[in-house]
Image (tube, rainbow, N blue to C red):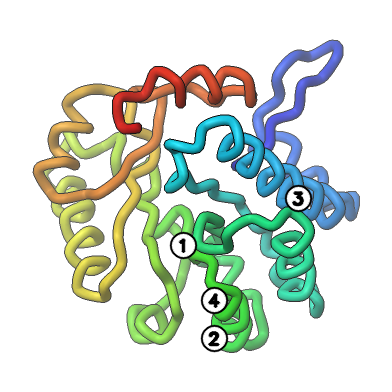
C-alpha cells in the first residue's frame, strides 16, 4: 500500500509529490503508522468478506525515517496484535537507500523478520546496497524498479539487467516483483524470465477499497 491523497481542490495527488513534503514537515511518522494500521485492518476485513482469499497479502511501504525509529519493531508488533492479522500476510517494503541510512540494518531487519512477516526491497537497482551485504539481510522479495522494466524493449542491455536481477534473487532464495508493467509485451517477457509477480497499470491502476473488493470477487484465482 502506497498512500494517495484525495485533495478537495486538486484531486488525487501522487505520493511522489506529497511524501517528500510530509517528510520535510515531520508528518511522515504519524502518516506511516496510520497507513500500516489501516492496511492491516483492511486486509482483515477482506478476509472476513472473502474467506476463499485466505492467502491474500498486503504490502506497506516504510519510509527511511520510519526505519530510524527506535521503537519501530514494537509499533509493528502492536499493530499486528491489535488487528489480529496473520503476520505472514504482511509485506513491509523498504528501499535500498532507507536500509543504508539505518545504523544497524541487519539487526533491525532481523527483529522485524522475527515477527514472522515478509520483507521486500523496493526499487531494487536504484540505490547503493552492496551485493555482499544484500545476502546478509533476511529479505524475502526484490522489487525491480519500473525504470528497468519500462526500458526492456529499448536495448538488450536493459533486458539483461532485469534478467540478472531475477537470477540474483532466485540464487538468494528470494522471489521477484516487477514494478511498472504497462503493456502485454513487458508482461510476456518478464513471465519468460520467471518473474513470479508484477504490478502496474497493465493489471490495474491504484484502487480504493470497494473497487479492490469487486476485483477480488471477479478474480478466477480464488
Above or below, 7 relative to 157: above
Q: Are marks 2 and 1 in contact (CB under 8 Å)?
A: no
Q: Mark 1 falls on what kind of element?
A: strand
Depth check, mark 2 against mark 3: the one in front is 3
**Closer to the camera in the image, 49 or 196:** 49
Packing grade of label 4 (10 A; few <14, some 14-19, many >=20) is many
Q: Position of residue 39 (x, y in %)?
A: 67, 44
Q: Which residue is mark 4?
A: 113
Label 2 vs label 3: CA separation? 25 Å
State the residue at coordinates (47%, 61%). Answer: 120
Instruction: Tell me the tag on residue 37.
Output: 3
Side of 222 where 33 appears, left or right = right
Closer to us: 1 or 115? 115
Measured Cα–Cα span from mark 1 to mark 4: 13 Å
For disc 1, the neighbor class at 10 Å (few under 14, some 14 to 19, many from 20) is many
Could you tell which of marks 1 and 4 lies nearer the N-terminus? 4
Q: Nearer the viewer, mark 1 or mark 4?
A: 4
Residue depicted at 65% across the width and 78% down the height? 102
Q: Residues within 10 Å of mark 2 (few under 14, many from 20)?
A: some
**Callout 4 secondary element:** helix
Precedes in sequence: disc 4 or disc 3: 3
Q: Is residue 188 above or below residue 71?
A: above
Badge 3 crowding class, 10 Å Cα cut-off, few under 14, some 14 to 19, many 20 or more, is some
Residue 187 lies left or right of residue 94; in this view the side is left
Q: Which residue is mark 1?
A: 121
Front residue of 67/116: it is 116
> Left or right: where does residue 198 sit relative to residue 20?
left
Real-space Cα separation, disc 3 to disc 1, in angstroms: 21 Å
Which residue carries the number 2 mark? 106
Amino acid at each position: 500500500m502506497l498512500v494517495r491523497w484525495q485533495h478537495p481542490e486538486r484531486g488525487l495527488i501522487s505520493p511522489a509529490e506529497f511524501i517528500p513534503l510530509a517528510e520535510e514537515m515531520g508528518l511522515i511518522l504519524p502518516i506511516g503508522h496510520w497507513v500500516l494500521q489501516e492496511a492491516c485492518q483492511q486486509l482483515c476485513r477482506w478476509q472476513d468478506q472473502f474467506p476463499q482469499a485466505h492467502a491474500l497479502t498486503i504490502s506497506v511501504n516504510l519510509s527511511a525515517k520510519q526505519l530510524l525509529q527506535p521503537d519501530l519493531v514494537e509499533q509493528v508488533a502492536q499493530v499486528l496484535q491489535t488487528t489480529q492479522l496473520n503476520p505472514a500476510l504482511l509485506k513491509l517494503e523498504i528501499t535500498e537507500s532507507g536500509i543504508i541510512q539505518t545504523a544497524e540494518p541487519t539487526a533491525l531487519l532481523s527483529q522485524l523478520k522475527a515477527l514472522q512477516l515478509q520483507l521486500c526491497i523496493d526499487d531494487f537497482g536504484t540505490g547503493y546496497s552492496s551485493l555482499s551485504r544484500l545476502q546478509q539481510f533476511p529479505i524475502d522479495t526484490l522489487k525491480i524498479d519500473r525504470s528497468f522494466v519500462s526500458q526492456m524493449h529499448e536495448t538488450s542491455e536493459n533486458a539483461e539487467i532485469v534478467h540478472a536481477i531475477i537470477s540474483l534473487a532466485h540464487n538468494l532464495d528470494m522471489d521477484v516483483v516487477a514494478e511498472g508493467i504497462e503493456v502485454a509485451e513487458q508482461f510476456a517477457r518478464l513471465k519468460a524470465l520467471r518473474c513470479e509477480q508484477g504490478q502496474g497499470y497493465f493489471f490495474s491502476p491504484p484502487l480504493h477499497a470497494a473497487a479492490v473488493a469487486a476485483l477480488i470477487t471477479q478474480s478466477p484465482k480464488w
